[in-house]
Structure formats: structure tokens, C-alpha cells
């Protein structure tokens, strides 16, 4: 059994992780899962969790935290008029079906493939943050019909499969079709709820009979990690939202991109090293 000082350090790390994820989600418009998943992956490894399940538990726990992260962040954005409710009504069902499919696939993948998928997407997100041009546009309005629903399914599916919030993919998509950045970030925060709730449920069911799970887990969801990360998020997410509406975070975007590159390389090194 872990010593009390180690448990205290782990608890503090998880609370701080939630705080950082909340600020990053609100400020940069990327899902907090892009921070939460790698931290949990390394922490679970440090306490000796089986490699076969630690990535699944990191993804599932990250998705569960969106219930708090997205709720707090979306409410703060909505108070500023930055959530497009009409778009959510049009787009929500296709995102939901994508989430169910993506989480189902993620629950079936082995740990190595799931970790590799996350590392690959982290590099993609890093490239977008570092080199992306916020003024880039494909056209000045969203696609309609099948095109919009296909994009929603893809965003929901990939996000749920590797435990990241909707903002990681939906913000670049929306901004490329003429959405103001503040409104794209706010709407993406609400999309996080559509991704997190069903995604977490699917991963919880998939992990119910897996014997190698960590203690106090609901399926693949680590309940202690969920509670501690959510505690940090509740206090930090509104702060990130305020910063998003007050700052031009180009320098922070590039710094966070470098963090993602280092994280992805370290995860890949663990797979192939």
C-alpha cells in the first residue's frame, strides 16, 4: 500500500492537473483531456497499474471529468453569449453517435494501439497550435447536411476514443468556416458534454469485467482520480474563460504545443523503447 506522503503527492498532482486542464480548455479552446490523459497515463504507470489497462483508465477518467469541466466552462461561456445553441441542436445527434462508436472502438483496442493513437493526435494538435493561422478560412459559413453531420461524427468519434474534449478538433473546424474564435471556443465547451457523458458510460461498461483495473474504479473510470481532477477544474475553468476573452494567447499556444510534442515523444518512447 502506498505511503501517506505518496498518496498526498498524487492527490495534489491530480488537483493541479484539473486546474491546468480547466485553464487550458478555457483559454486555448483545446479539450482538457489533452492534459489529463497523459498525466493519468504516467501517474497510473508510476503506481504500478497494469500496462494493459492504464491507457483505457486514463481515457475513461478523462471523459468522466468532462461532466464537470464542460459544465463549468460552457456555463461561463454561455453567460458571455459565446455558446451557439442553435448549432448544438443541429450538430448534437451526429456528434453523439460518433462518440458511442469511437468509445466502443477505444474500449476494444489494446493499450499499445490506444496510446499510439493518442500520441499521434497530440502531435497533430501541437502542429496546429504552433503553426496554425487563426485567420485561415476554407469558406465563410459551415457546411450543411451530410457534410456537417460527417464532421460531427468524426469529431465525436476520435475525441471519445482517446479521451479529449471536443474543442481540440471542433475549434479548428469551426474557425476554418468563419466562426469567431471566442464563439467557437464557447460552443466547443458545450460539445464537451456531448462527448464526455456517453463516452464515459461506454468506457465504464467496457471495463466492468476487466480484472486488472485499479482500485475504486467504475469500469475503466478511476473514481478517486475523477473526484480530485474535478475539484481542481471547478475553480480553474472560469478563470481560463475570462482569460480567453481578455488575452491573445499566441505565446502560450506555442509553449503548450512544445509540451504536447514532448509528451507525445515520451509516450511513444515508452511503447517502442
Image (cartoon, rainbow, N blue to C red):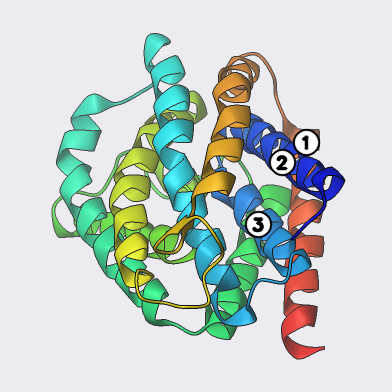
Foreground mark, 3 or 1, reads: 3
The residue to which callout 3 is attached is 40
Residue bearing the label numbered 1: 252
**In the image, which disc is placed on residue 11?**
2
Mark 1, Cα crowd under 10 Å, few <14 / some 14-19 / many 20+, is some
Which residue is the extreme one toward the right? 5
Q: Residue at 61%, 57% (x, y): give it.
A: 37
Q: Position of residue 162 (x, y in %)?
A: 49, 64
Quarter of the image that includes the C terminus: bottom right
Q: Is residue 30 left or right of residue 201?
A: right
Rounded to the nearest angstrom, the CA distance separating label 2 from label 3 is 12 Å
Residue 57: mark in rendering:
none
Q: Which residue is pictured at 72% across the width and 84% down the height?
A: 271
Q: Confirm whether residue 269 shows in the render.
A: yes
Disc with the residue nearer the chain's start (1 vs 2): 2
**Secondary structure of residue under mark 1:** helix
From the image, which quarter does the N terminus lie in?
A: bottom right
x, y percent for residue 249: 72, 29
Q: Nearer the viewer, residue 138 or 103?
A: 103
Instruction: Pick out the residue farthest to the top.
Output: 79
- Would residue 238 be found to the left or right of residue 100 on screen? right
Which quadrant of the figure has residue 239? top right
Name the secondary structure under disc 3: helix
The percent coordinates of residue 60 (x first, y second) are 46, 59
Q: What is the C-alpha distance between the residues marked 1 and 2?
A: 26 Å
| Residue drawn at 64 percent across, 62 percent down | 122
Amino acid at each position: 500500500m502506498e505511503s501517506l506522503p505518496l498518496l498526498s503527492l498524487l492527490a495534489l498532482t491530480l488537483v493541479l492537473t484539473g486546474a491546468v486542464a480547466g485553464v487550458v480548455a478555457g483559454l486555448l479552446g483545446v479539450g482538457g483531456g489533452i492534459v489529463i490523459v497523459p498525466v493519468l497515463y504516467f501517474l497510473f504507470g508510476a503506481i504500478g497499474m497494469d500496462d494493459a489497462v492504464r491507457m483505457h483508465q486514463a481515457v475513461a477518467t478523462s471523459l468522466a471529468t468532462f461532466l464537470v469541466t464542460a459544465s463549468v466552462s460552457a456555463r461561463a461561456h454561455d453567460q458571455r453569449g459565446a455558446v451557439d445553441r442553435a448549432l448544438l441542436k443541429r450538430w448534437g445527434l451526429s456528434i453523439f453517435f460518433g462518440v458511442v462508436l469511437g468509445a466502443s472502438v477505444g474500449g476494444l483496442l489494446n493499450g499499445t494501439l490506444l496510446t499510439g493513437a493518442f500520441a499521434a493526435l497530440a502531435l497533430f494538435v501541437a502542429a496546429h497550435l504552433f503553426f496554425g493561422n487563426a485567420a485561415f478560412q476554407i469558406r465563410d459559413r459551415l457546411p450543411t447536411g451530410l457534410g456537417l453531420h460527417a464532421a460531427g461524427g468524426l469529431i465525436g468519434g476520435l475525441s471519445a476514443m482517446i479521451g479529449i474534449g471536443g474543442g481540440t478538433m471542433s475549434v479548428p473546424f469551426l474557425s476554418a468556416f468563419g466562426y469567431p474564435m471566442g464563439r467557437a471556443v464557447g460552443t466547443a465547451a458545450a460539445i464537451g458534454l456531448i462527448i464526455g457523458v456517453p463516452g464515459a458510460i461506454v468506457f465504464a461498461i467496457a471495463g466492468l469485467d476487466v480484472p486488472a483495473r485499479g482500485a475504486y474504479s467504475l469500469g475503466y473510470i478511476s473514481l478517486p482520480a475523477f473526484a480530485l481532477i474535478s475539484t481542481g477544474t471547478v475553480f480553474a475553468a472560469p478563470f481560463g474563460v475570462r482569460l480567453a476573452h481578455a488575452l491573445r494567447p499566441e505565446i502560450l499556444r506555442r509553449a503548450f504545443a512544445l509540451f504536447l510534442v514532448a509528451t507525445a515523444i515520451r509516450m511513444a518512447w515508452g511503447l517502442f523503447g
